[in-house]
Image (spheres, rainbow, N blue to C red):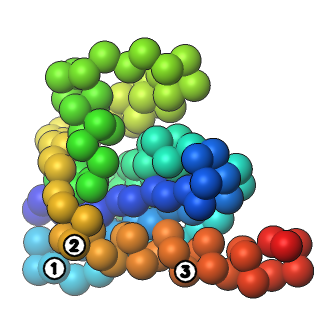
Amino acid sequence: MKYQMNTDGGARGNPGPSGIGIVIKNDKKEKIFELGSYIGKATNNQAEYTALIEGLKAALERDITKLNCLLDSELIVKQMRHEYKVKNAELKVLWQTALGLASKFKEIEFNHVLREKNYEADLLVNKALDAYQESPKGI
């Protein structure tokens, strides 16, 4: 069975307060995992990689071996496919972590989707950021 994972990361300010969103569905399009979380101060790209890493960990914890990763960050997709080099030192560490996790799957794909097709993960990012900014410590 091949699973689908949508991930998204976002920062309000670049860098700024950041969040991640992850949705994993089975082959019947049933949601088996979702997470929206505030991750602290980060850039958009750092948040995107963090979402991917946490999503890969969640998939492995659920014994998923075949995964289609859908991201609205073309940069991250192309870096994970080795089509673009990773020049930023901080991103390179995250990229290497993601590659290490990806190597544990029997089958894994990284595909770019338009933001509109990634709305569930995007919504989780924004909910996490809204909750952070509305909390007393988010001021």
Rendered location of residue 111, percent (x, y): 16, 48
Q: CA distance from mark 1 to mark 2?
A: 17 Å
Mark 1 neighbour density, 10 Å: few (under 14) some (14–19) many (20 or more) = few
Say which residue label 1 marks.
29
In three-dimensional space, the C-alpha distance between marks 2 and 3, rounded to whole angstroms, equals 16 Å
User: What separation in Å lies between label 3 and label 1 (alpha carbons)?
Assistant: 22 Å
Q: Which residue is mark 3?
A: 127
Q: Decide: is 93 above or below 117.
A: above
Picture coordinates of residue 49 (x, y %)? 45, 43
Question: What number of labels is visible?
Answer: 3
Image point (33%, 77%), residue name: 120
Which of disc 3 and disc 2 is earlier in sequence? 2
State the image quarter where residue 82 is shown.
Answer: top left
Q: Where, by quadrant of the figure, is residue 109 drawn?
A: top left
Query: How busy is the neighbourhood of tag 2: few (under 14 within 10 Å), some, or many (20 plus)?
Result: few
Q: Residue tagged by mark 2?
A: 116
The residue shown at (16%, 79%) is 29
Residue 57 visible in the displayed image: no
Amino acid at pointer 1: Lys
Amino acid type, label 2: Glu
Q: Residue at x 58, y 47 (%)?
A: 14
Helix, strand or loop at label 3? It is helix
